[in-house]
Image: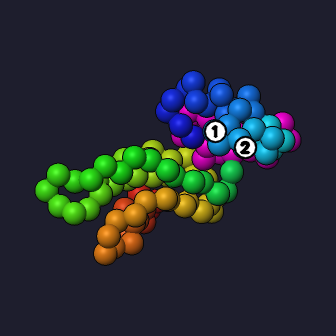
Amino acid sequence: MDSDITKVHTLNSGKAPRDLDYLLAKHTASGRLRFTASYGEAADFTDLHFIGVGTPNQTSADAHDLIHLADAARRLAPGLTRPAAIAAQVHRPGRHPTQGLLDPALV
């Protein structure tokens, strides 16, 4: 799921960054991989969700601002109607990246 509809269309057409066009085209054509700008479609399509969002540094601390991660999880959660796994790619020094964010969003 990406809010950039141009990026969604580009990925769904089989074009990828970093010379991955062959793999992307193969798996989007098979229907096993799909991109969308809709949280509802993303929740309904699969049981494994990858969240990769911007995590800018907080201005007052040596840590990342995880507001975008929390927002993505909270928007995805209402559409999950069966057990699902959510993976997040974020690094926050001294703390697990999703500590205190994903569990409350999924309750």
The reply to whether the magenta stretch includes residue 7 is no
From this viewpoint, which residue is outermost toward the left? 60
100 and 22: which is toward the camera: 22
Relative to 13, say whether 82 is above or below. below
Tell me the tag on residue 17: 1
Relative to 38, say whether 88 is above or below. below
Tell me the tag on residue 28: none
- Circles 2 and 1 in contact, beta carbons < 8 Å: yes
Relative to 26, say whether 50 is above or below. below
Q: Secondary structure at mark 2?
A: loop
Residue 95 image-quadrant placement: bottom left
Residue 85: x %, y % from top left: 60, 63
Tell me the tag on residue 20: 2
- Circle 2: residue type: Leu
Q: Which residues are magenta?
A: 28-45
Residue 13: x %, y % from top left: 74, 28
Q: Residue at x 29, y 57 (%)?
A: 64
71 relative position to 34: left or right = left
